[in-house]
Image: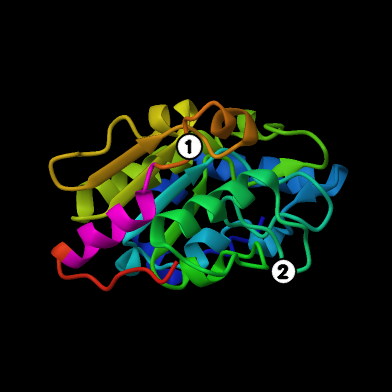
Amino acid sequence: MKLYLNPSWQTILADEIKKPYFLELMDALDEEYQNHICFPPKKLIFSAFNNCSFEDVKVVIIGQDPYHGVGEANGLSFSVNDSVKIPPSLRNIFRELNDDLDSIFMPTSGNLERWAKQGVLLLNASLSVRIDTPNSHKHLKWGTFTDAVIQKISEEKENVVFMLWGSFAQKKGAKIDRTKHLVLESGHPSPMSANQGKWFGNKHFSQANAYLKLNGETEIEW
């Protein structure tokens, strides 16, 4: 499978993408995309990286896997294409964002590309999925690759904000070096978790911006 991964990340991950498991992963993806309907489109699998270079990463938001409905996934965690109805988890993210930053307007599009362009790495643990089948590509060793990405950011950068929403993301981010990064944890924004009082009021967006400002970085225009 052709690797649609921008040069900055190809350099940073040069050793990783030569490893046998990654080459096997690319072959397995080719087979999956040939024999099944999978999302996102091949060219968008690495969108999280292609919209946010390693040098620009300020915030990392970890999701589980892409949306599995037709036309939804665009390669960014929690994000959907412009014309797609905003999913419940993302609606709750926007609600918290509005409450936290005292905004007047709710976003009308669920496309988070504008966040990515400002240095928010919207990283799913698995970067692909079969139609209507959540977690169907978990066995393809995506997790090994995305663990390596998180480790690389943790080791080689400083003052990055990691947002870990829900137990899955918290386990995924367990090895982040908290002595030089800000790790924000809360419940997941899904309706079940949010309605149990584990999401709303976490104020992650204002905390992230305050930390970035304190460390001389430009704040994110959420």
| Residue 165 in view in this figure | yes
Instruction: Where is residue 89? Give x, y as percent.
Output: 62, 44
Instruction: Where is residue 76? Give x, y as percent.
Output: 58, 57
**Secondary structure character of the magenta stretch overall:** helix
Quadrant where the C terminus lies? bottom left
Mark 2 crowd level (few <14, some 14–19, many ≥20, 10 Å Cα) = some
Compare marks 2 and 1 and give the one earlier in the sequence: 2
Residue 157, magenta (yes or no): no
User: Residue 173 vs residue 108: left or right?
Assistant: left
Q: Nearer the viewer, residue 160 or 89?
A: 89
Specify the amino acid type for callout 2: Asp
Specify the amino acid type for callout 1: Trp
Q: Nearer the viewer, residue 108 or 104?
A: 104
Residue at numbered disc 2: 82
User: Residue 197 vs residue 44: left or right?
Assistant: left
Instruction: Where is residue 144? Give x, y as percent.
Output: 46, 35
The residue at 23%/46% (across/down) is: 182
Residue 210, magenta (yes or no): yes
Question: What residue range appears in magenta?
Answer: 202-213
User: Residue 70 vs residue 11: left or right?
Assistant: right
Mark 1 crowd level (few <14, some 14–19, many ≥20, 10 Å Cα) = many
Image quadrant where residue 183 sits: top left
Q: Secondary structure at mark 1?
A: loop
Instruction: Residue 37: give its label.
Output: none
Q: Nearer the viewer, residue 125 or 195?
A: 195
The residue at 39%/31% (across/down) is: 170
Instruction: Residue 199: give its label.
Output: 1
Kindly report which numbered mark, 2 or 1, lies closer to the viewer in this rendering.
Answer: 1
Image quadrant where residue 27 sits: top right
Q: Secondary structure at mark 2?
A: loop
Instruction: Where is residue 19? Give x, y as percent.
Output: 45, 42
Quadrant where the N terminus lies? bottom right
